[in-house]
Image: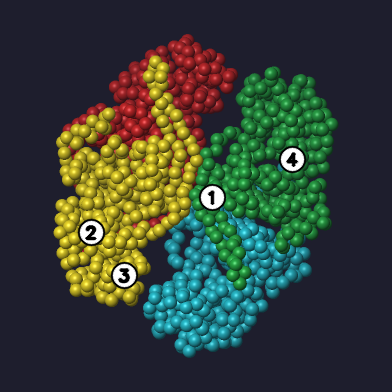
Chain colours: A green, B cyan, C yellow, D red
Amino acid sequence: MTDLRIGAIGCGYWGPNLIRNFIEIPGAVVVAVADLQPEPLNRMMQRFPQIETSTTDYRDLFDLDLDAVVIATPPATHYAIARDCMEHGLHVLVEKPITLNSDDAQRLIDVAEAHDRVLMVGHTFEYNSAVRAIKEMITSGELGDIYYIDAIRASLGLFQTKANVVWDLAPHDISILRYLLDADPVSVNTHGSSCVQQGIEDVAYTTLMFPNNVLAHIRSSWLDPSKQRRITVVGSKKMVIYDDVEPLEKVKIFDKGVKAIRHTDTYGEFSFAYHYGDVVIPYIRFEEPLRVQCQHFLDCVREGKQPDTDGHNGKRVVQIVEAAQRSMQNGGDTVYLNGNGRGNAAEARRVKELAHA
Amino acid sequence: MTDLRIGAIGCGYWGPNLIRNFIEIPGAVVVAVADLQPEPLNRMMQRFPQIETSTTDYRDLFDLDLDAVVIATPPATHYAIARDCMEHGLHVLVEKPITLNSDDAQRLIDVAEAHDRVLMVGHTFEYNSAVRAIKEMITSGELGDIYYIDAIRASLGLFQTKANVVWDLAPHDISILRYLLDADPVSVNTHGSSCVQQGIEDVAYTTLMFPNNVLAHIRSSWLDPSKQRRITVVGSKKMVIYDDVEPLEKVKIFDKGVKAIRHTDTYGEFSFAYHYGDVVIPYIRFEEPLRVQCQHFLDCVREGKQPDTDGHNGKRVVQIVEAAQRSMQNGGDTVYLNGNGRGNAAEARRVKELAHA
Amino acid sequence: MTDLRIGAIGCGYWGPNLIRNFIEIPGAVVVAVADLQPEPLNRMMQRFPQIETSTTDYRDLFDLDLDAVVIATPPATHYAIARDCMEHGLHVLVEKPITLNSDDAQRLIDVAEAHDRVLMVGHTFEYNSAVRAIKEMITSGELGDIYYIDAIRASLGLFQTKANVVWDLAPHDISILRYLLDADPVSVNTHGSSCVQQGIEDVAYTTLMFPNNVLAHIRSSWLDPSKQRRITVVGSKKMVIYDDVEPLEKVKIFDKGVKAIRHTDTYGEFSFAYHYGDVVIPYIRFEEPLRVQCQHFLDCVREGKQPDTDGHNGKRVVQIVEAAQRSMQNGGDTVYLNGNGRGNAAEARRVKELAHA
Amino acid sequence: MTDLRIGAIGCGYWGPNLIRNFIEIPGAVVVAVADLQPEPLNRMMQRFPQIETSTTDYRDLFDLDLDAVVIATPPATHYAIARDCMEHGLHVLVEKPITLNSDDAQRLIDVAEAHDRVLMVGHTFEYNSAVRAIKEMITSGELGDIYYIDAIRASLGLFQTKANVVWDLAPHDISILRYLLDADPVSVNTHGSSCVQQGIEDVAYTTLMFPNNVLAHIRSSWLDPSKQRRITVVGSKKMVIYDDVEPLEKVKIFDKGVKAIRHTDTYGEFSFAYHYGDVVIPYIRFEEPLRVQCQHFLDCVREGKQPDTDGHNGKRVVQIVEAAQRSMQNGGDTVYLNGNGRGNAAEARRVKELAHA
């Protein structure tokens, strides 16, 4: 089995992590790096002398007999570069968000199909051992029916001047929610505030209504005194907290809950049974999620498989962020999502009815 | 100075705490207790043998030459009982929420004025040392401009069959927010979900827009694996977390923040200055907030003062809960509040403009 | 079944807790209280008007046809009062330490036997649900062989002027260790320091060697910035932490450990197998330990049973504290304990040999 | 300024960290690596292709015109290799412990002086920002008189087959204690237990008495369910906790304490004034301690300075570990340290007197 030949485009903030992984995984070699700036290129060539070529023009990579590229450039450039690379016969792993609008995402999907290329987006959390463990608890029925999911991603974060906090942070949680619930939301509401920079929201609250009346809520903030990264999944049987800030006890399963019990007496009232049991912190063998993701990309390239986080996945996340953005611009009004991510009156009515059921 | 003669109406869940406090504070005696059920009455008489009279009809208290009553009955009865007591010449401390609708609250205010009686509502957190310490930091300018406030009140809570989680838990946070910001919200959005009982929301997310674009958000949940009671106040100079679940380190002041700095170069871009400093956990001398509240009531009765948490305060909180309830019933649509708690088109437009500024 | 008639002697710091419990438990009445000071007596009579008699001379209790007394006076008075009460036909529950020297403890045992009275000492932790849960894990073999136990009891504590920190805090941990290991220590070393008051140690470190080479260590401090009350039990199969300061997650069971594996190769070296598994926080139904203890005393009185924490138990704890005190006075020299708590040359040699095995 | 030419001897567990630092610090080049095993050598050459030479015989380094070597080989080899290198004209940075006995340490000091070479030992914590911040609080008087220091270093650690837990972990704490108190202990007691491996203690408790009756205690354990690395410094004015396991809030300063106040009344008793103030978590700019240490070594080599952690420092730490080892072998008996680390009867008497003062 010959090594897959990889090129890396963009080696600023996140790119070096991808490069390191593809260098360390057996079965792949990083042949070349591209970046508009010479400085990060030099840093990479010094740190990884095994890389043969560096260039400020990513199109130079088309002459190097590569199998695939990994793209970690600013989001606004994802579409053009990914398209160009696939049209030159290369498989593509592109960072999240796949594009800045869902039409472009669809076009990338079309190009990938037309050229029979692998198109994968770097939604790393879907390769995270803790998230996968929770997914398994949901699938196996251990948690019971899912009531709601609460997600927080906050810290005194790196402010950006071109994207707001929803585009920056929420894709992670949206990707996790879709993965855990195996569904797309029906509606989105987002309230945001631009505290530090006019016009760039740095704090946002997003409510997502999923099918079967499952509520999800995402708090996104670049402006919080303490770093928080937590997902709480509340089911009818058990509840789980995944706290990514905890160094060791990342996942806690609470064997507790509450059940409404209908009285049989004349009052027709409810009473409640509270259930308290053990808390379990399962031992989860940790693997670097990015490593799992990069390995999965190589497997897909080699075997011609569709990646778990393929273009469709990437497009759905972008559609939901678009909806959140639209809601936020309209003071938090509800935006309904249908199959193509645009409003649908019938569905909207159904959702309203569900909400008042 | 003769002791003030107090009667207690309602001695179920919260009433005994009020009774204990009025017994322990010098200058007051609890003369009588009333409750519809004999069982809690017996418990009180056994525990506090100094109480002279117990009765299942609160109107028996009108013959006992009392100065004041404290009402801790179910919320639906607050209005009728408080009104009756004031009309019989008694000063009234009533538990939160003051009434179940703001019109009734206004009527109580009118009765109190007509009969020159003290009408006070038990918004205990406004008498809490930690909340007061934060208020002082805001007033003194120590925190800078307030950017936003995030509030969480969640646990595997006591489910109720008549009121949803917004009526049960949010009044505490609304009272705190109004106190800290010294303002009323301009608009309210609430998203809720009825997980366990049909039609009774047990999880709710409320967004409040205050004047000057100050965002506030309240998470209320009866269905959370871990007990959380936390207020995060983010200012332009400092940030504060008040975590009521922490046994000792309840208030943490973070001397950190971020500032947008406009570049003077041709690009007109922003860059950001991050500021990191010490974290301080101030030593706050704790007094039982309920004790402070009860003492304040006695002072107001004795000196004819208007309480800090008077009828107007109680009514404003009810108006905001009403708005949250209305929003929740309409799938989270924005409800605008004006002086009388009802929609106002001009104000609504202004808010929308602010939100998009 | 007629109520047992109880008298309470000493109602300063801890006495009121005992009185409250005996009042609340069905089957007992607190008939009288005694204390040298009128002030605490008045407080008790006000708080518990059902108590008939109060007196500054405990001997007045002998005329009241009591069944039993509970003694919560200063330790120096335990011996004389307990003896006097038993000789007047009363069953006795006395606070820890039972006496200030083991000879007096033996004398109390003798008096109890001669008069056929129940003599019980208030080692509350042996009635604590968390401690009992750990004891069960040890007994059932769940933890494997016990390797060592580490105990910490520290805070910015209430300084005493008559007893040092070993006499004040260590009896709790010694009682727990004896209970968990079902054995007495073979030797004791204590190092202390008198930081604030000359001659009264406020910080002490005690090492206890139990049979089978099980090491235990107790840190006792009145001078620590954070309150700590933690017992760590390390077994060959599992490890347990009991953290009494944690409000909810008091007991954590770690399914992890390390095993030495002898190589079969020529080097004869060891390698180690590390075992990592889940962490479990068992749901332990909490009952106030003092309530369990008081109930046990009543049961013993009624049924003529020997209490779990009887005079012998109380005496053994005192013997170990005496040994710790002796060691501390000699700069931490080892003090060996035999059946009567005094040095024994043969045993000492055996311990030394064990230690170097 | 030409680069200093560095050779690295030993690149197993800790060596790569040293190599990385010397590669990253400007002003130094790592020219060669030596190790007995080819495997770690290959790993280093792959990771750091800028290294010119690798060899399984460290003596090959003598021909490469080096300025200095860093030695991270097993402790038993430190003495011979460090000596050989200095005798061949090289400056030496050697990992802790400098040697396995203090006589060898003295010999290294002598060789360094005879050949005018820098001899430095890698007591990294003396270059740690948190430890240095605490040292400054002590020196400035902010903490008042130091009463005692408690140190814990425990985890389910890497077991060793040749050294016990005292030789492995305690040198860190001994180095910190000497640095903070600017003094050597007068006496040492150590109690240990060999739980997993016969004859190799994996749990140990060490008590150190410093001048002015300052008590220090070190808990060292390879067998603890939770990782703990904490130093508590209790002073007469303030108390400090340095918790190295905390990701952010490593140092907490407690403005609280207790003072004995002599009564002027006839009883001559004490009462206590408790002082409670703010807790401050100072913002400490973190620098990798190993980086600071390596930079300091380069500075000393360049300027001919004596390192902060020189051979004398390394020897004193070894003497104290030797004393702890001796005490542990004798069941915890006190070992007195004088200038040369051996018992001294006069000093011993003085210590005993101090202990009982």
User: Left or right of D269: which side holds B37?
Assistant: right
Instruction: Please say if B330 is above or below A117.
Output: below
Q: Select label 3 or label 4 by which is in front.
A: 3
User: Left or right of C339: which side holds A148?
Assistant: right
Circles 2 and 1, Cβ within 8 Å, touching? The answer is no
* Circle 3 residues within 10 Å: few <14, some 14–19, many ≥20: few
User: Do badges 4 and 2 share one subunit?
Assistant: no
Q: Nearer the viewer, residue B60 or C154?
A: B60
Q: Say what amino acid the circle numbered 4 marks.
A: Gly
Q: Select label 4 or label 2 by which is in front.
A: 2
Q: Chain of mark 3?
A: C
Q: Select label 2 or label 1 by which is in front.
A: 2
Instruction: Please say if D202 is above or below A214.
Output: above
Q: Say what amino acid the circle numbered 2 marks.
A: Leu
User: Do badges 2 and 3 share one subunit?
Assistant: yes
Q: Chain of mark 1?
A: A
The residue to which callout 3 is attached is C1
The residue to which callout 2 is attached is C119
Q: Select label 2 or label 3 by which is in front.
A: 3
The residue to which callout 1 is attached is A254
* Rendered image: mark on residue A314: 4
Circles 2 and 3, Cβ within 8 Å, touching? The answer is no
Residue drawn at (27%, 29%), measured in percent from left and top?
C357
User: Left or right of A248: which side holds B111?
Assistant: right
Q: Say what amino acid the circle numbered 3 marks.
A: Met
User: Which mark is first along the chain, 3 or 2?
Assistant: 3
In the rendered image, which quarter is residue D300 located in? Answer: top left
Q: Nearer the viewer, residue C339 or D233?
A: C339
Q: Nearer the viewer, residue B150 or B152?
A: B152
